[in-house]
Amino acid sequence: MAKKNKNDTMEKIVSLCKRRGYVYPSSELYGGLTSCWDYGPLGSELKRNIKTFWWDAMTNRRDDIEGLDAAILMHPEVWKVSGHVDEFVDPMIDCKTCKARFRADKLEECRCGNKPSKTPLECGGELTEARNFNLMFKTFMGPIEDSSATIYMRPETAQGIYVNFLNVKNSSRQKIPFGIAQIGKAFRNEITPGNFIFRTREFEQMEMQYFVHPDEDEKWFEYWREQRWAWYESLGINMSKLRWHEHKDDELAHYAKAAYDIEYEYPFGWQELEGVHNRTDFDLGRHMEATGKDLRYFDERFTEKFLPYIVETSAGCDRTILTCLVDAYDEVEVKGDMRVFLRLSPKIAPIKAAVFPLVKKDGMPEAAKKICAELKKKFKVFYDEAGAVGRRYARQDEAGTPFCLTVDGQTLEDETMTLRDRDTMEQTRMRVEDVIKFLDEKVNG
Ligand code: ATP
């Protein structure tokens, strides 16, 4: 097995993503737009699969979590009350020589905006003092563009959950402890976006807020740390590349009692993938104070009225996609050629199986198309008859397809076909009903 060069792994992944239709630069025809990316045919499928995998684990397979899909645009007071207008800031510094801007607390990750091959101080320039920069994007609601019409693009999905706490509690009749889960876009005017889809200005979050009794917050905090760790394991991530990072007092957000990040070892170093936070009763308390609405909770188990504490699990969808791609990327030398394999788990792989007729004659294409149509009722499959079968395998290996099915002369006699496993390279003959059972187990098991 060939050794991977850490420095160019990201470049290779970015190029594979474009070649195979995972991710394209946004507005590429116009030269692209910094930090904005479009998900192509395979990328949009991978994204949807990851979101479904999260949604199933966090809502459908549980009785205690409800779903929500709140609007991106919210009442501007929400962001004043939540503290975002005053405190959602990053420290920004400028290079006095080349005028490039950097996030002061992430200087070691930054490249010079004017010369991306260089780090901030490599030009020999001098940096200004840090000053705070608010990350919220602003826009105007309605036809008049003045300060009374200013609204914000949400920088996190969580606030949509807090302001709907009463609605969801009343309509679902959930009892504490219970949670509300949401997947949606968030926007942050990041000072230094970068590392492909790792840090962008428009991104998607998969967040869950779990409402608990204040005396039980630590128990539920530990519970959710375990659950989220296990989720990445079930996603097929190499667990030796994940670690916990505890926020010490100097890192802890003003509202948080405890916070741990799940970090992944990307080619550009260990970075946050998801945060698990104990947000206390800060958010509900602030919204209760500002609106005068009683957000406290009462039930028989606790003979008192109390404001619930919140344990939050906040994962980036795009970061999870990047993690899966980086984790799955593999290069292997096959007969002197360097071949790329994208070893995505069948649970999230965009195409579950490719179907090939061995040759384009003798009734094989017709038989393969029939099998393909049967499989399409349950799985995303792909039919390919173009070129030598070895080339077709190679294309699917690179695209992350876990299984290839080849229809040959024997298929026409006994209705069996070969199923070839991308990772073990093993080939097994199966009938179509066994292929369906096999795929079902691999994809949904
Ligand atoms: P950082 O310190 O890296 O800016 P953060 O601690 O502010 O991140 P959170 O507010 O905890 O991030 O956001 C929760 C999750 O949302 C992160 O773990 C990450 O997966 C995702 N996320 C946050 N900002 C971005 C971004 N700019 N681009 C992509 N994903 C992001």
Image: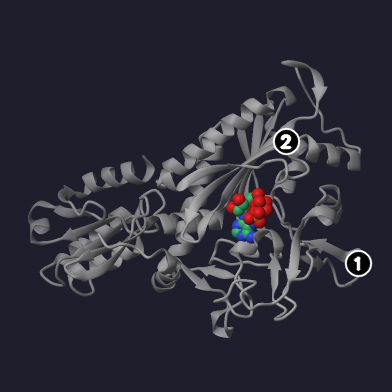
Q: Nearer the viewer, residue 109 or 263?
A: 109
Q: CA distance from mark 2 to mark 1?
A: 35 Å
Residue 109 visible in this rendered orientation of the protein:
yes
- Could you tell me which residue is drawn at 71 percent across and 72 percent down? 101
The residue under label 2 is 257
Q: Quadrant of the C terminus?
A: top left
Q: Residues within 10 Å of mark 2 (few under 14, many from 20)?
A: some
Q: Is residue 5 toward the left or the right of residue 242 in the image?
A: left
Query: Helix or strand or loop: what does disc 1 sit on?
Result: helix
Secondary structure under tag 2 reads loop
> What residue sits 15% from the left and 49% below the top?
428
Q: Locate the N terminus by quadrant.
A: bottom left
Q: Earlier in the sequence, mark 2 or mark 1?
A: 1
Q: Is residue 85 positioned above or below 302 on the image? A: below
Where residue 90 sits: x, y (%)? 74, 59
Query: Quadrant location of ligand 1?
Result: bottom right
For residue 258, above or below residue 402: above
Residue furthest toward the bottom? 30
Q: Which residue shows up at 70% across the image and 81% down it?
A: 98
x, y (%) of residue 373? Answer: 29, 58
**Mark 1 closeness class: few <14, some 14–19, many ≥20 residues within 10 Å:** few
Residue 306 is labelled as none
Judging depth in this view, the residue of 65 and 172 nearest the camera is 65
Residue underneath mark 1? 147
Q: How many marks on residues?
A: 2
Q: Give the amino acid at mark 2.
A: Lys
Q: Nearer the viewer, mark 2 or mark 1?
A: 2
